[in-house]
Image (cartoon, rainbow, N blue to C red):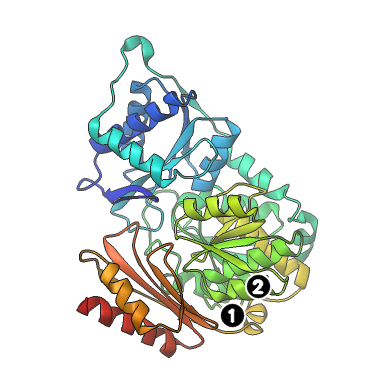
Protein backbone atom coordinates (compact mmCIF):
# COMPACT_ATOMS: atom_id res chain seq x y z
CA UNK A 1 0.00 0.00 0.00
CA UNK A 2 1.48 3.33 -1.11
CA UNK A 3 -0.41 6.45 -0.07
CA UNK A 4 -0.24 9.74 1.80
CA UNK A 5 0.31 7.53 4.87
CA UNK A 6 3.57 6.13 3.46
CA UNK A 7 4.62 2.73 2.14
CA UNK A 8 3.32 -0.20 4.12
CA UNK A 9 2.89 -3.92 3.71
CA UNK A 10 3.23 -7.36 5.24
CA UNK A 11 6.80 -8.10 6.28
CA UNK A 12 8.55 -10.54 3.94
CA UNK A 13 5.70 -10.46 1.46
CA UNK A 14 4.93 -6.94 0.26
CA UNK A 15 7.60 -5.22 2.36
CA UNK A 16 11.19 -6.44 1.96
CA UNK A 17 14.62 -5.01 2.83
CA UNK A 18 15.32 -4.50 -0.87
CA UNK A 19 12.18 -2.41 -1.36
CA UNK A 20 12.84 -0.46 1.84
CA UNK A 21 16.42 0.27 0.80
CA UNK A 22 15.32 1.55 -2.60
CA UNK A 23 12.77 3.91 -1.07
CA UNK A 24 15.33 5.14 1.44
CA UNK A 25 17.86 5.85 -1.32
CA UNK A 26 15.20 7.69 -3.32
CA UNK A 27 14.20 9.75 -0.29
CA UNK A 28 17.83 10.57 0.44
CA UNK A 29 18.31 11.69 -3.15
CA UNK A 30 15.31 14.02 -2.80
CA UNK A 31 16.82 15.49 0.36
CA UNK A 32 20.18 16.02 -1.34
CA UNK A 33 18.51 17.66 -4.35
CA UNK A 34 16.91 20.14 -1.95
CA UNK A 35 20.33 20.96 -0.52
CA UNK A 36 20.04 19.21 2.85
CA UNK A 37 21.42 15.65 2.97
CA UNK A 38 20.75 15.11 6.71
CA UNK A 39 17.95 12.58 7.36
CA UNK A 40 16.53 11.51 10.73
CA UNK A 41 15.84 7.77 11.16
CA UNK A 42 13.50 6.33 13.81
CA UNK A 43 11.38 3.24 14.40
CA UNK A 44 8.77 1.73 16.65
CA UNK A 45 9.22 -1.62 18.41
CA UNK A 46 8.06 -4.03 15.71
CA UNK A 47 10.36 -7.04 15.46
CA UNK A 48 11.18 -6.25 11.83
CA UNK A 49 12.25 -2.72 12.81
CA UNK A 50 15.99 -3.38 13.29
CA UNK A 51 16.19 -5.17 9.94
CA UNK A 52 14.44 -2.38 8.09
CA UNK A 53 16.42 0.27 9.97
CA UNK A 54 19.61 -1.32 8.65
CA UNK A 55 18.19 -1.26 5.13
CA UNK A 56 17.10 2.38 5.44
CA UNK A 57 20.47 3.41 6.85
CA UNK A 58 22.29 1.65 4.02
CA UNK A 59 20.03 3.22 1.40
CA UNK A 60 20.55 6.70 2.81
CA UNK A 61 24.31 6.31 3.18
CA UNK A 62 24.60 4.96 -0.36
CA UNK A 63 23.41 8.30 -1.76
CA UNK A 64 25.57 10.42 0.53
CA UNK A 65 23.15 11.29 3.32
CA UNK A 66 24.13 11.92 6.92
CA UNK A 67 21.86 9.74 9.06
CA UNK A 68 20.75 10.90 12.52
CA UNK A 69 19.64 7.70 14.20
CA UNK A 70 17.12 7.96 17.06
CA UNK A 71 16.38 4.30 17.75
CA UNK A 72 12.97 3.41 19.20
CA UNK A 73 10.98 6.61 19.67
CA UNK A 74 7.42 7.80 19.02
CA UNK A 75 6.64 9.11 15.55
CA UNK A 76 5.94 12.64 16.86
CA UNK A 77 9.33 12.57 18.60
CA UNK A 78 10.94 11.87 15.22
CA UNK A 79 8.98 14.70 13.58
CA UNK A 80 10.20 17.11 16.24
CA UNK A 81 13.76 15.81 15.77
CA UNK A 82 13.62 16.65 12.05
CA UNK A 83 12.89 20.25 13.00
CA UNK A 84 15.46 20.25 15.83
CA UNK A 85 18.27 19.09 13.54
CA UNK A 86 17.13 21.29 10.64
CA UNK A 87 17.23 18.06 8.64
CA UNK A 88 16.25 17.53 5.06
CA UNK A 89 13.63 15.05 6.23
CA UNK A 90 13.04 11.92 8.21
CA UNK A 91 12.04 8.29 7.80
CA UNK A 92 10.01 6.57 10.51
CA UNK A 93 9.72 2.79 10.36
CA UNK A 94 6.27 2.04 11.76
CA UNK A 95 2.97 0.57 10.66
CA UNK A 96 1.19 2.57 13.36
CA UNK A 97 -2.06 0.74 14.23
CA UNK A 98 -1.71 -2.08 11.68
CA UNK A 99 -1.49 -5.70 12.92
CA UNK A 100 1.80 -7.18 14.08
CA UNK A 101 2.72 -8.74 10.72
CA UNK A 102 2.83 -5.31 9.03
CA UNK A 103 5.48 -2.63 8.89
CA UNK A 104 5.87 0.59 6.94
CA UNK A 105 7.94 3.64 6.08
CA UNK A 106 6.60 7.10 6.85
CA UNK A 107 8.37 9.99 5.15
CA UNK A 108 8.71 13.34 6.91
CA UNK A 109 9.54 16.54 5.04
CA UNK A 110 11.99 19.19 6.29
CA UNK A 111 9.08 21.03 7.95
CA UNK A 112 8.32 18.03 10.18
CA UNK A 113 5.13 17.21 8.23
CA UNK A 114 4.58 14.04 6.21
CA UNK A 115 5.07 14.39 2.47
CA UNK A 116 2.29 15.76 0.30
CA UNK A 117 0.82 13.70 -2.53
CA UNK A 118 2.92 15.29 -5.28
CA UNK A 119 6.23 14.73 -3.50
CA UNK A 120 5.15 11.24 -2.53
CA UNK A 121 4.39 10.44 -6.18
CA UNK A 122 7.83 11.65 -7.24
CA UNK A 123 9.44 9.58 -4.49
CA UNK A 124 7.63 6.51 -5.71
CA UNK A 125 8.74 7.09 -9.29
CA UNK A 126 12.36 7.51 -8.21
CA UNK A 127 12.23 4.35 -6.09
CA UNK A 128 10.76 2.32 -8.94
CA UNK A 129 13.29 3.62 -11.47
CA UNK A 130 16.24 3.43 -9.09
CA UNK A 131 18.75 6.11 -8.14
CA UNK A 132 22.55 6.02 -8.61
CA UNK A 133 24.68 5.20 -5.59
CA UNK A 134 27.88 7.05 -4.75
CA UNK A 135 31.37 5.53 -4.56
CA UNK A 136 33.46 4.89 -1.49
CA UNK A 137 34.32 8.57 -1.15
CA UNK A 138 30.67 9.71 -0.94
CA UNK A 139 29.17 7.37 1.66
CA UNK A 140 27.25 9.27 4.34
CA UNK A 141 28.03 9.27 8.05
CA UNK A 142 25.80 8.05 10.89
CA UNK A 143 25.26 9.98 14.13
CA UNK A 144 23.21 9.01 17.18
CA UNK A 145 20.77 11.35 18.93
CA UNK A 146 19.92 10.02 22.39
CA UNK A 147 18.11 13.14 23.57
CA UNK A 148 15.06 13.23 21.31
CA UNK A 149 12.58 11.84 23.87
CA UNK A 150 13.77 14.19 26.62
CA UNK A 151 13.37 17.17 24.27
CA UNK A 152 9.86 16.05 23.35
CA UNK A 153 8.78 15.84 26.99
CA UNK A 154 10.31 19.25 27.77
CA UNK A 155 8.60 20.87 24.78
CA UNK A 156 5.19 19.57 25.90
CA UNK A 157 5.73 20.73 29.47
CA UNK A 158 6.85 24.18 28.29
CA UNK A 159 3.68 24.83 26.30
CA UNK A 160 1.69 27.86 27.51
CA UNK A 161 -1.45 25.68 27.40
CA UNK A 162 0.03 23.34 30.04
CA UNK A 163 0.11 24.45 33.70
CA UNK A 164 2.42 21.85 35.17
CA UNK A 165 1.91 22.97 38.77
CA UNK A 166 -1.88 22.85 38.45
CA UNK A 167 -1.76 19.30 37.10
CA UNK A 168 0.68 18.22 39.81
CA UNK A 169 -1.58 19.60 42.53
CA UNK A 170 -4.37 17.28 41.38
CA UNK A 171 -2.16 14.21 41.82
CA UNK A 172 -3.96 12.21 39.16
CA UNK A 173 -4.00 8.42 39.30
CA UNK A 174 -3.50 7.26 35.71
CA UNK A 175 -3.76 3.79 34.18
CA UNK A 176 -1.64 3.39 31.06
CA UNK A 177 -1.48 0.86 28.20
CA UNK A 178 1.49 1.19 25.83
CA UNK A 179 0.83 -2.11 23.96
CA UNK A 180 4.59 -2.95 24.14
CA UNK A 181 5.25 -0.23 21.57
CA UNK A 182 7.30 2.95 21.61
CA UNK A 183 5.03 4.53 24.22
CA UNK A 184 7.04 2.81 26.92
CA UNK A 185 9.96 5.18 26.33
CA UNK A 186 7.96 8.39 26.83
CA UNK A 187 4.50 8.08 28.39
CA UNK A 188 5.53 7.04 31.94
CA UNK A 189 8.22 9.72 31.97
CA UNK A 190 5.78 12.45 30.94
CA UNK A 191 3.04 11.38 33.34
CA UNK A 192 5.36 10.99 36.32
CA UNK A 193 6.86 14.42 35.64
CA UNK A 194 3.30 15.77 35.78
CA UNK A 195 2.94 14.29 39.26
CA UNK A 196 0.75 11.36 38.27
CA UNK A 197 0.64 8.02 40.02
CA UNK A 198 0.97 5.60 37.10
CA UNK A 199 -0.19 1.98 36.88
CA UNK A 200 0.92 0.60 33.54
CA UNK A 201 0.69 -2.41 31.27
CA UNK A 202 2.52 -3.06 28.02
CA UNK A 203 5.61 -0.98 28.86
CA UNK A 204 8.00 -3.52 27.35
CA UNK A 205 9.45 -2.28 24.06
CA UNK A 206 9.72 -5.64 22.31
CA UNK A 207 6.91 -5.31 19.76
CA UNK A 208 5.08 -8.40 21.01
CA UNK A 209 1.71 -6.71 20.99
CA UNK A 210 -0.56 -8.38 23.58
CA UNK A 211 -3.70 -7.07 21.86
CA UNK A 212 -4.70 -5.73 18.49
CA UNK A 213 -2.63 -2.53 18.39
CA UNK A 214 -5.33 -0.07 17.37
CA UNK A 215 -6.55 1.72 20.54
CA UNK A 216 -10.26 1.35 19.84
CA UNK A 217 -12.69 0.44 22.67
CA UNK A 218 -12.95 -3.21 21.61
CA UNK A 219 -9.21 -3.66 22.23
CA UNK A 220 -8.95 -1.94 25.62
CA UNK A 221 -10.55 -4.49 27.95
CA UNK A 222 -7.39 -5.02 30.01
CA UNK A 223 -6.90 -1.28 30.46
CA UNK A 224 -10.54 -0.88 31.52
CA UNK A 225 -10.00 -3.59 34.13
CA UNK A 226 -6.83 -1.85 35.33
CA UNK A 227 -8.66 1.46 35.75
CA UNK A 228 -11.27 -0.18 37.94
CA UNK A 229 -8.72 -2.22 39.90
CA UNK A 230 -6.49 0.72 40.87
CA UNK A 231 -9.24 3.35 41.08
CA UNK A 232 -7.66 5.49 38.36
CA UNK A 233 -8.99 8.91 37.45
CA UNK A 234 -8.38 8.19 33.78
CA UNK A 235 -6.95 5.54 31.50
CA UNK A 236 -4.66 6.31 28.56
CA UNK A 237 -3.97 3.92 25.68
CA UNK A 238 -1.62 4.59 22.79
CA UNK A 239 -0.88 2.84 19.53
CA UNK A 240 2.60 1.40 18.80
CA UNK A 241 4.06 4.63 17.39
CA UNK A 242 2.37 6.91 19.96
CA UNK A 243 0.61 9.39 17.71
CA UNK A 244 -2.88 8.34 18.85
CA UNK A 245 -4.35 8.42 22.36
CA UNK A 246 -7.58 6.82 23.59
CA UNK A 247 -9.31 7.56 26.89
CA UNK A 248 -10.95 5.33 29.48
CA UNK A 249 -13.12 7.05 32.09
CA UNK A 250 -12.94 6.55 35.86
CA UNK A 251 -15.57 3.79 35.69
CA UNK A 252 -13.42 1.71 33.34
CA UNK A 253 -15.41 2.60 30.25
CA UNK A 254 -13.60 3.21 26.97
CA UNK A 255 -15.22 6.38 25.63
CA UNK A 256 -13.78 6.42 22.10
CA UNK A 257 -10.84 8.27 20.57
CA UNK A 258 -12.90 11.21 19.34
CA UNK A 259 -13.21 12.46 22.92
CA UNK A 260 -9.42 12.72 23.03
CA UNK A 261 -9.58 15.39 20.33
CA UNK A 262 -12.65 17.03 21.88
CA UNK A 263 -10.81 17.36 25.20
CA UNK A 264 -7.71 18.69 23.45
CA UNK A 265 -9.71 21.24 21.46
CA UNK A 266 -11.48 22.49 24.57
CA UNK A 267 -8.23 22.72 26.57
CA UNK A 268 -6.59 24.80 23.83
CA UNK A 269 -9.57 27.04 23.06
CA UNK A 270 -9.80 27.97 26.74
CA UNK A 271 -6.34 29.45 26.30
CA UNK A 272 -6.26 30.60 22.68
CA UNK A 273 -9.39 30.95 20.56
CA UNK A 274 -8.96 30.44 16.83
CA UNK A 275 -9.74 28.13 13.90
CA UNK A 276 -10.01 24.38 14.39
CA UNK A 277 -9.44 21.86 11.58
CA UNK A 278 -10.25 18.13 11.72
CA UNK A 279 -10.65 15.38 9.16
CA UNK A 280 -13.89 14.40 7.48
CA UNK A 281 -14.40 11.32 9.68
CA UNK A 282 -14.16 13.14 13.00
CA UNK A 283 -17.04 12.98 15.46
CA UNK A 284 -19.54 15.75 16.09
CA UNK A 285 -18.38 15.76 19.74
CA UNK A 286 -15.48 17.91 18.50
CA UNK A 287 -17.91 20.31 16.78
CA UNK A 288 -19.81 20.57 20.06
CA UNK A 289 -16.61 21.35 22.00
CA UNK A 290 -15.60 24.08 19.55
CA UNK A 291 -19.11 25.53 19.42
CA UNK A 292 -18.91 26.40 23.12
CA UNK A 293 -16.21 28.91 22.16
CA UNK A 294 -18.01 30.23 19.09
CA UNK A 295 -15.65 28.41 16.75
CA UNK A 296 -16.74 26.53 13.62
CA UNK A 297 -14.91 23.40 12.49
CA UNK A 298 -13.03 23.23 9.19
CA UNK A 299 -12.66 19.81 7.60
CA UNK A 300 -9.88 18.20 5.57
CA UNK A 301 -9.35 14.82 3.88
CA UNK A 302 -8.35 11.93 6.12
CA UNK A 303 -4.61 11.66 6.67
CA UNK A 304 -2.30 13.53 9.00
CA UNK A 305 -0.49 15.30 6.16
CA UNK A 306 -3.78 16.54 4.72
CA UNK A 307 -4.96 17.87 8.06
CA UNK A 308 -1.59 19.47 8.81
CA UNK A 309 -1.59 21.44 5.57
CA UNK A 310 -5.21 22.48 5.99
CA UNK A 311 -4.40 23.66 9.52
CA UNK A 312 -1.49 25.69 8.23
CA UNK A 313 -3.63 27.30 5.52
CA UNK A 314 -6.41 28.12 8.01
CA UNK A 315 -4.08 29.39 10.73
CA UNK A 316 -5.64 26.83 13.08
CA UNK A 317 -4.73 26.90 16.76
CA UNK A 318 -5.57 23.22 17.22
CA UNK A 319 -6.91 20.30 15.21
CA UNK A 320 -6.32 16.69 14.37
CA UNK A 321 -8.08 13.47 13.58
CA UNK A 322 -10.88 11.75 15.44
CA UNK A 323 -8.81 8.59 15.85
CA UNK A 324 -7.18 10.14 18.93
CA UNK A 325 -4.65 12.28 17.06
CA UNK A 326 -4.35 15.79 18.52
CA UNK A 327 -2.30 18.37 16.59
CA UNK A 328 -1.09 21.65 18.08
CA UNK A 329 0.82 24.03 15.78
CA UNK A 330 2.44 25.66 18.82
CA UNK A 331 4.28 22.34 19.27
CA UNK A 332 4.37 20.89 15.76
CA UNK A 333 1.98 19.91 12.97
CA UNK A 334 1.74 16.25 13.79
CA UNK A 335 -0.48 13.90 15.79
CA UNK A 336 1.00 13.59 19.24
CA UNK A 337 -0.23 11.29 22.02
CA UNK A 338 1.98 12.74 24.80
CA UNK A 339 0.60 16.18 23.94
CA UNK A 340 -2.96 14.80 23.96
CA UNK A 341 -2.44 13.24 27.39
CA UNK A 342 -1.09 16.51 28.84
CA UNK A 343 -4.01 18.50 27.40
CA UNK A 344 -6.55 16.01 28.77
CA UNK A 345 -5.01 16.27 32.25
CA UNK A 346 -4.97 20.05 31.94
CA UNK A 347 -8.67 20.14 31.16
CA UNK A 348 -9.46 17.84 34.08
CA UNK A 349 -7.31 19.98 36.38
CA UNK A 350 -8.99 23.19 35.25
CA UNK A 351 -12.56 21.91 35.55
CA UNK A 352 -12.22 19.64 38.61
CA UNK A 353 -14.61 17.33 36.78
CA UNK A 354 -14.27 13.63 36.01
CA UNK A 355 -13.93 12.21 32.51
CA UNK A 356 -17.25 10.39 32.85
CA UNK A 357 -19.08 13.51 34.01
CA UNK A 358 -17.72 15.57 31.10
CA UNK A 359 -18.89 12.95 28.62
CA UNK A 360 -22.30 12.57 30.27
CA UNK A 361 -23.22 16.24 29.96
CA UNK A 362 -22.56 16.38 26.21
CA UNK A 363 -24.86 15.25 23.39
CA UNK A 364 -24.44 11.55 22.76
CA UNK A 365 -23.50 10.11 19.37
CA UNK A 366 -22.56 6.68 18.15
CA UNK A 367 -20.02 6.04 15.40
CA UNK A 368 -20.29 2.85 13.40
CA UNK A 369 -17.32 1.82 11.29
CA UNK A 370 -17.35 -0.91 8.70
CA UNK A 371 -15.18 -2.18 5.88
CA UNK A 372 -15.94 -3.60 2.46
CA UNK A 373 -13.71 -4.99 -0.28
CA UNK A 374 -12.63 -2.41 -2.81
CA UNK A 375 -13.64 -3.39 -6.32
CA UNK A 376 -12.95 -0.98 -9.17
CA UNK A 377 -14.00 2.64 -9.59
CA UNK A 378 -15.94 4.13 -6.69
CA UNK A 379 -17.48 7.01 -8.67
CA UNK A 380 -20.72 5.13 -9.47
CA UNK A 381 -21.13 4.44 -5.75
CA UNK A 382 -20.69 8.12 -4.88
CA UNK A 383 -23.22 9.16 -7.53
CA UNK A 384 -25.80 6.64 -6.30
CA UNK A 385 -25.29 7.69 -2.69
CA UNK A 386 -25.69 11.35 -3.63
CA UNK A 387 -28.99 10.62 -5.38
CA UNK A 388 -30.24 8.46 -2.52
CA UNK A 389 -29.43 11.08 0.11
CA UNK A 390 -30.14 14.23 -1.88
CA UNK A 391 -31.09 16.15 1.28
CA UNK A 392 -27.57 15.90 2.70
CA UNK A 393 -24.66 18.34 2.36
CA UNK A 394 -22.09 16.58 0.20
CA UNK A 395 -18.30 16.94 0.53
CA UNK A 396 -16.09 15.34 -2.13
CA UNK A 397 -12.65 16.21 -0.75
CA UNK A 398 -12.03 12.58 0.21
CA UNK A 399 -14.43 10.05 -1.18
CA UNK A 400 -17.93 11.23 -0.26
CA UNK A 401 -19.14 12.67 3.02
CA UNK A 402 -22.87 13.28 3.42
CA UNK A 403 -23.84 15.44 6.38
CA UNK A 404 -27.00 16.40 8.23
CA UNK A 405 -27.20 18.56 11.40
CA UNK A 406 -26.92 15.62 13.80
CA UNK A 407 -25.41 12.81 11.70
CA UNK A 408 -23.12 12.02 8.78
CA UNK A 409 -21.91 9.25 6.50
CA UNK A 410 -18.40 9.04 5.05
CA UNK A 411 -17.44 6.55 2.33
CA UNK A 412 -13.81 6.54 1.20
CA UNK A 413 -11.04 4.26 -0.03
CA UNK A 414 -8.59 3.36 2.73
CA UNK A 415 -5.05 4.69 2.46
CA UNK A 416 -3.64 1.83 4.56
CA UNK A 417 -5.60 -1.25 3.44
CA UNK A 418 -7.17 -2.41 0.11
CA UNK A 419 -10.69 -1.73 1.34
CA UNK A 420 -13.48 0.83 1.33
CA UNK A 421 -14.24 2.41 4.70
CA UNK A 422 -17.87 3.05 5.63
CA UNK A 423 -18.20 5.36 8.62
CA UNK A 424 -21.39 6.89 10.01
CA UNK A 425 -22.30 8.84 13.13
CA UNK A 426 -25.77 9.52 14.52
CA UNK A 427 -27.52 10.07 17.86
CA UNK A 428 -28.16 6.31 18.11
CA UNK A 429 -26.36 3.16 17.03
CA UNK A 430 -29.41 2.07 15.08
CA UNK A 431 -29.48 5.27 13.02
CA UNK A 432 -25.74 5.06 12.27
CA UNK A 433 -26.03 1.39 11.34
CA UNK A 434 -28.87 2.21 8.93
CA UNK A 435 -26.61 4.70 7.14
CA UNK A 436 -23.78 2.16 6.90
CA UNK A 437 -26.16 -0.56 5.73
CA UNK A 438 -27.53 1.73 3.03
CA UNK A 439 -24.02 2.52 1.82
CA UNK A 440 -23.04 -1.13 1.86
CA UNK A 441 -26.11 -2.10 -0.12
CA UNK A 442 -25.37 0.51 -2.76
CA UNK A 443 -21.71 -0.53 -2.88
CA UNK A 444 -22.65 -4.16 -3.48
CA UNK A 445 -25.09 -3.21 -6.25
CA UNK A 446 -22.87 -0.60 -7.96
Q: Is residue 93 visible?
A: no
In which image quadrant can residue 154 be found? top right
- The dot on residue 251 is 1
Distance from the alpha carbon under mark 1 to that under mark 2: 22 Å
Give the mark, 1 or 2, whose residue is nearer the N terminus.
Answer: 1
- The dot on residue 349 is none
Q: What is the x, y in percent for residue 352?
A: 76, 73
Local packing at callout 2 (Cα closer than 10 Å; few below 14, some 14-19, many 20+) is: many
Vertical side of 259 occupied by 9: above or below: above
Q: Residue at x 53, y 78 (%)?
A: 253
Vertical side of 41 occupied by 316: above or below: below
Q: Which of these two is toward me, 296 or 178?
A: 296
- The dot on residue 289 is 2
Q: Residue at x 38, y 33 (%)?
A: 27
Q: Residue at x 40, y 61 (%)?
A: 213
Q: Which of these two is toward me, 387 or 148?
A: 387
Q: Which of these two is toward me, 172 or 435?
A: 435
Viewer-nearest of discs 1 and 2: 2
Would you say 206 lies left or right of 254 here? left
Q: Residue at x 55, y 63 (%)?
A: 278
Local packing at callout 1 (Cα closer than 10 Å; few below 14, some 14-19, many 20+) is: some
Amino acid sequence: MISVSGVRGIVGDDLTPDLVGRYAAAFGTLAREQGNPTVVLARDTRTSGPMFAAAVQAGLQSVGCRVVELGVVPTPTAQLAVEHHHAGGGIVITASHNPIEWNALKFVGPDGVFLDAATGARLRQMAEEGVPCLGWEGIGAVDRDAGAVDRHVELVLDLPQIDVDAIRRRGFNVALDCVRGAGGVIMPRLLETLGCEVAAIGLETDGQFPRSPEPVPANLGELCDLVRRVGADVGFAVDPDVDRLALVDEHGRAIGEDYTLAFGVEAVLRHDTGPVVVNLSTSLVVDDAAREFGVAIGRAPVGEANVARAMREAGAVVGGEGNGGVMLPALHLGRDAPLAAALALQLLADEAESVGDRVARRPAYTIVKAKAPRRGDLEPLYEMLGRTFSDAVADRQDGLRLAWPDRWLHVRPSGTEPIVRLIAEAPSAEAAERLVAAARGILESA
